[in-house]
Amino acid sequence: MATKTIESVLHENRVFPPNPALARRAAIPSMDAYRKLCAEAEKDFEGFWGRLAREHVLWHKPFTKVLDESKAPFFKWFHDGELNASYNSLDRHLKTQPDKTAIIFEADDGKVTKISYQELHRRVCMMANGLKSRGIAKGDRVIIYMPMSIEVVMAMQACARIGAIHSVVFGGFSAKSLQERIIDAGAVAVLAEGVEAFFEQVCAALGLRRNQD
């Protein structure tokens, strides 16, 4: 059977330059700046990524080696450095732009909610302290079973803040699917919203009483 070649009828060669005012505020304001970055990376890629990591990431413990190739193909980047992802995405903005909008969330009904870095930081810290008060600590596994919302971002941030490992489970999964993921992850907690009746099924599947943590 003969095959037919797919022919593209779209040939687009137009170039749309950005607004000059917008370009001046961009991290990479021009093609010349972009080419300069590419040339730097091609010349010394470890030095390139090391420079960017030092300039743009806040480290609790600075790294001493950019790339460890001793066990290739299992490469390790910045392996001896230590940082906190939540601190890097929230705290670093509090001194310079605390009132800047961090999240714009539009719900299914069209309602738009905006939250600033300062307010998001406050609520993430509250949730992180709540997790700690329940005995959740660094290295513990936490399942996040929540609908799309600002709160689900807070939950992920709170886990990262205290060093807990989070696993996000799609909110449309069944009780059985959630039960399997709780067991597979070895989770010590499930963060959920508005699913009381549903969790009766999950607790039953896990063989737990409803009042157990």
Image (cartoon, rainbow, N blue to C red):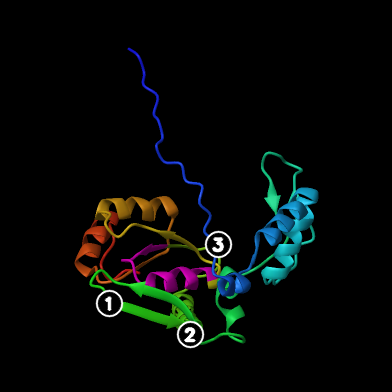
- Please name the residue shown 75% across and 67% down the image: 62
Q: Nearer the viewer, residue 70 or 15?
A: 15
Q: Is residue 82 magenta?
A: no
Residue type for callout 1: Lys
Dot 2 and dot 3 residues touching (CB under 8 Å) = no
* Distance Cα–Cα, label 2 vs label 1: 23 Å
Instruction: Please give the residue where the numbered disc 2 appears in the rendered image.
Output: 122
Query: Which residue is outermost to the left?
Result: 197
Q: Is residue 159 magenta?
A: yes
Going from N to C along the chain, the mark reached first, 2 or 3, is 3
Residue type for callout 3: Pro
Instruction: Please give the residue where the numbered disc 1 appears in the rendered image.
Output: 111
**On-image quarter of the C terminus:** bottom left
Q: Which residues are magenta?
A: 143-160
Where is residue 92 drawn, in percent x and y?
Answer: 61, 79
Where is residue 147 drawn, in percent x and y?
Answer: 31, 66
Instruction: Please give the residue where the numbered disc 3 appears in the rendered image.
Output: 17
Residue 213 is labelled as: none
Q: Nearer the viewer, residue 20 or 126?
A: 20
Q: Residues within 10 Å of mark 3 (few under 14, many from 20)?
A: few
Tag 1 secondary structure: loop
Where is residue 115 drawn, in percent x and y?
Answer: 42, 81
